Image: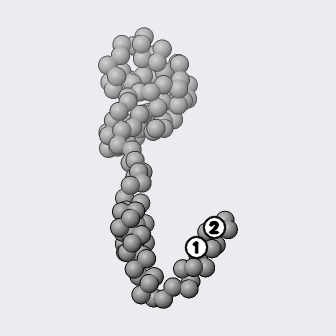
């Protein structure tokens, strides 16, 4: 602390309880503050202002890999899910990793993931 602050603190220490209470009231009026608010409430207000963690609501289904022996079964699923033709689906499966569908809710993404995994693919959600 600075010398000036220490001097003020020493002067405050010498005040009576009544004088200290009057000083606090004058400081509140002069600086337009209210020091009677408990610190717990101030902490709660600070917590309210902090950004809440975002809960992910949209998922992308990412096709990571396909074993060679499962490629034909997976092509059928990819064609059904995406509406691609045979050549486009084949190109899609051969250029992994690829997003099969994006922006799905949790249930739809899990369902699609399960369907692709049953066909033999390695799938992840992001």
User: Looking at the rendered structure, which numbered label has been put on residue 123?
Assistant: none
- Of residue 51 and residue 7, the one placed in the foreground of this image is 7
- From this viewpoint, is residue 22 visible? yes
From mark 1 to mark 2, how far is it between C-alphas?
6 Å
The residue carrying pointer 1 sits among few (fewer than 14), some (14 to 19) or many (20 or more) residues within 10 Å by Cα, namely: few
- Residue 95, compared with residue 31, is above or below; it is above
**Residue underneath mark 1:** 8
The quadrant where residue 34 appears = bottom left
Rendered-image quadrant of the N terminus = bottom right
- From this viewpoint, is residue 111 visible? no
* Callout 1–callout 2 Cβ contact below 8 Å: yes
**Residue underneath mark 2:** 4
Residue 55 horizontal/vertical position (percent) = 38, 48
The residue carrying pointer 2 sits among few (fewer than 14), some (14 to 19) or many (20 or more) residues within 10 Å by Cα, namely: few
Residue 82 horizontal/vertical position (percent) = 34, 22
Residue at the spot x=32%, y=44% of the render? 107
Residue at the spot x=58%, y=73% of the render? 8
- Of residue 55 and residue 68, the one placed in the foreground of this image is 55
């Amino acid at each position: 602390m600075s010398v000036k602050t220490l001097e003020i603190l020493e002067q405050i220490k010498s005040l009576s309880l009544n004088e200290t209470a009057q000083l606090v009231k004058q400081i509140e009026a002069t600086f337009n503050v209210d020091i009677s608010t408990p610190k717990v409430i101030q902490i709660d207000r600070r917590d309210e202002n902090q950004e809440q963690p975002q809960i992910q609501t949209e998922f992308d289904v990412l096709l990571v890999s396909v074993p060679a022996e499962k490629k034909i079964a997976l092509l059928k699923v990819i064609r059904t899910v995406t509406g691609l033709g045979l050549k486009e689906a084949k190109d899609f499966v051969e250029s992994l990793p690829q997003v099969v569908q994006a922006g799905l809710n949790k249930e739809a993404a899990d369902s699609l993931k399960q369907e692709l995994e049953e066909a033999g693919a390695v799938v992840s959600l992001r």
